[in-house]
Image (spheres, rainbow, N blue to C red):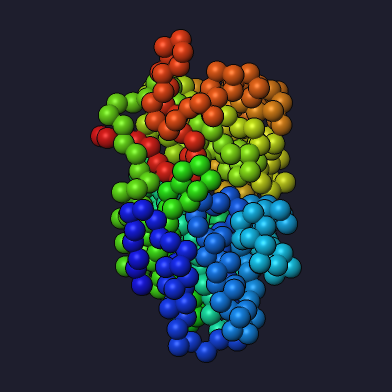
Amino acid sequence: MIIKSETGIGRGELRAALEKSIEGKSLKKVLLVPPDYTRMYSGAGTITAEYYDIFTKAGVNVDILPALGTHDPMTRGECLAFFGKDVPFEKIIAHNWRTDVVRLGEVPAEFVNDVSEGLVNSNIDVEVNKLIADKSYDLIISIGQVVPHEVVGMANYSKNIFVGCGGSNMINSSHMLGAFYGMERIMGRDFSPVRRVFDYAQEKFLGGTPLIYVLTVTTNKGDDTYIHGLFIGNQRSLFEEAVALSRRLNLTYVDSPLKKVVVYLDEREFKSTWLGNKAIYRTRMAIADGGELVILAPGVRKFGEDDENDRLIRKYGYVGRENVLKLVAENDDLQNNLSVGAHLIHGSSDGRFSITYCTEKLSGDEVRSVSFGYAPYSEAVKRYDPSKLTDGFNTLDDGEEIFYISNPALGLWSVKN
């Protein structure tokens, strides 16, 4: 099922589509797999709430497993803001990527070597949350947004299962595979090496799972989210249609490299550089060599979402691709946490442009210790006031021209060539 709307799909039309998606199915127990609060503009919170209402009114037992990946579990307040008051917090199950998984099999090294053009030659374990493999569910509905992504090219579809509900080996290996291959060769594109690994795993190991995908393509204006595309089913062709729509709506091309970019990170969504570094990798293909990136980050209070990841980021810092690859080769703690190595690569400009984090919950010493520049948030917003800036080019009172982005999570910016 595919529904598209230039202005946004209305709530009534959305509800009707979700009801149609389960028409004729005899269901007693269902698992919903939405994203977490870090995808607050995905429309998935609303879709989850609608499905929950439809199923509970029909007497179906519903569990909800947010696809956390390595992120912190959702708080009661975040669940309320994302799903609404009619989805009980007690129904939310927190995924633990280190302990809650079962192994379904592996993607063989020969396949990984082939899709990575010889850059990676190792098996990748296919691990998913034990509930995904639980035969007591009559239906599993994976809900999420298709949008440009630094690891897989375009987010969602099977990534929601294999990373969002995946285990440490799959998360680590897929992230490092993407980092080895190169973000610029991946972001905004389908059929990346990582996506082909996920396709292999889905075909080989999820064939008997009663799984359907509900994919959205969205834009936002302030806190308002507009669902322009809804794609429901389990055929890959639906994902490809969503990719095409997202590439049209979520990619922004500029005529020439940008000298100064200012990105705002909503404090409700971005509490770590693990998430906030979207400001870096989603803009890196648009920023000029020698340019500046200023990140307004009032909510960022740590580096990693996970305590161990946070420790490793503080230990090694965002020191550039070549340095990180050397550190990974020389240090067991990074070899055992390859997703951190990948993240450190993603979070560096490799010396091409300067990066200044403007925080109030992380000190200047902490920010500088991981190789970022620092400015106090309270000072930065006097010059770059998000309430006065509009997305795109802005000219300040003193004549300085900047390019402003209010939410890096919903797009990808690049020079046209």
| Residue at the limit of the structure toward the top, as seen here | 398
Query: Image height check: is 380 above or below 157?
Result: above
On the question of residue 26 being in view, the answer is yes
Q: Quadrant of the N terminus?
A: bottom left
| Residue at the limit of the structure toward the left, as seen here | 417
Question: Residue 347: where, in percent of width, then height?
Answer: 53, 36
Which image quarter: residue 171? bottom right
- Name the foreground residue: 110 vs 77: 77
Query: Image height check: is 318 above or below 138?
Result: above
- Name the foreground residue: 198 vs 88: 88
Total marks shown come to: 0
Which image quarter: residue 167? bottom right
On the question of residue 164 being in view, the answer is no
Asked if residue 48 lies left or right of residue 153, the reply is right
Question: Residue 288: where, in percent of width, then height?
Answer: 37, 24
Residue at figure coordinates x 53%, y 22% from the top left? 384
Residue at figure coordinates x 50%, y 57% from the top left? 43
Query: Image height check: is 138 above or below 284?
Result: below
Question: Residue 293: where, in percent of width, then height?
Answer: 49, 25
- Name the foreground residue: 87 vs 416: 87
Question: Residue 123: where, in percent of width, then height?
Answer: 49, 62
Residue at figure coordinates x 36%, y 53% from the top left? 7
Asked if residue 231 lies left or right of residue 15, the reply is left
- Name the foreground residue: 104 vs 208: 208
Asked if residue 181 lies left or right of residue 142, the reply is left
Residue at figure coordinates x 62%, y 49% from the top left? 337
Q: Quadrant of the C terminus?
A: top left
